[in-house]
Image: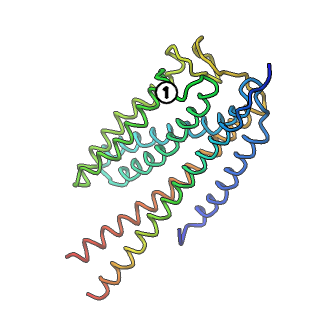
Amino acid sequence: MDTPNTLNYMLAGYLIFSVTFFGYLVSLWVRWQGLQAEEKALQEVENQE
Amino acid sequence: MSTQPRALVALNVVSLLLLAASYYASLVYAPLEAVMGAVQRVFYFHVATAWVGMIGFVLAAVAGILYLWKKDLKWDEISVAAVEISLVFFFIAIVLGSIWARPIWGTWWTWEPRLTTAAILEMVYLAYLLLRQGVEDPEKRARFGAVYTLLGGISVPVTFVSIRIFRTIHPVVIGSGSAEAQGGFNMAPAMLQTMFFAIFAFSIIFVTIFWHRMRLSALANRVEQLKLKVME
């Protein structure tokens, strides 16, 4: 029995894994940056008062 | 993320190396499966992501119990972090399974017991994150979350054992499954090693991401406290 050519499915699987996994890591980083900027701005307001 | 503890920096490096090694083991080290071809290689990441997804949902249920016992909001934050990360991993596991199923079963999706319980599990925890947002009071939200993760946790063992107790076409690679299973294969030693290595690697990666997610929660709390202080 010949081995079927299912390479495209494998590539699609690893591509989707990579995009979802690293996409989530980027979302964590973006949220962190946003909160840090907010914290800095609030600290400045607090210091001015 | 700035000013990370040294242990976390070390975990970042170890996790990246483990991820790279998992790619290598799955794509190069493990032999080509003769009957299914290259698509069988998604199996290693499919199993590993499903594993850490389920572990995270169990962790959320344990944190829920501890919240109800201790009434400390820290346990609620642990629940949310665990569920959020597990949702991502479990989503990947479902999609990888679907991609594997297309050439092997001839369909992207079928409502058989494992796929159905997995889809329900994912939706139960997606609803958890959405419904939490509707509760303003942190104590009430945490209490609701704790009870929800406890009840939701029931679907984890149901999903896990579904391929062993129901008639299903989903293969069981370790142990014996349903006689109607399609797409099962005998694991060569290198395949078995790759599978266990991927499970180990993704467990460490989960710990690393979980630590980052908890730091994010701590920062969000600090910002919330500052907002209240400034508004006074």
In the image, residue B113 sits, relative to residue B220, either above or below, namely above
The residue labelled by disc 1 is B115
Report crowding for label 1: few under 14, some 14 to 19, many 20 or more residues within 10 A (C-alpha): many
Please indicate whether residue B200 sits to the left or right of residue B121 in the image: right
- Quadrant showing the C terminus of chain B: bottom left
Percent of width and height locating residue B86: 48, 44
Relative to residue B4, is residue B226 drawn left or right? Answer: left
User: Which residue occupies the foreground of this view, A8 or B11?
Assistant: A8
The single residue placed furthest to the top in the displayed view is B179
- How far across and how far down the image is residue B150, in percent? 35, 36
Observer-nearest of A5 and A39: A5
| Type of the residue with mark 1 | Leu
Q: Residue at image x 44%, y 62%?
A: B216
- Residue reaching furthest to the left: B232
Q: Is residue B228 left or right of residue B49?
A: left
Residue at 41% x, 75% y is: A37
The residue drawn where x is 54% and y is 72% is B3
* Residue ID at (53%, 71%): B2
B11 vs B68, nearest the viewer: B11
Check the image and tell me how it is coloured. Answer: rainbow
Which of the 4 image quadrants contains residue A38?
bottom left
Q: Position of residue B183 (x, y in %)?
A: 65, 22
The chain containing the residue under callout 1 comes to: B
Q: Is residue B129 above or below residue B6?
A: above
Mark 1 falls on what kind of element?
helix
Residue B102 picture location, percent across and down: 59, 29
Outermost residue toward the bottom? A48
Against B64, residue B190 (above or below) is above
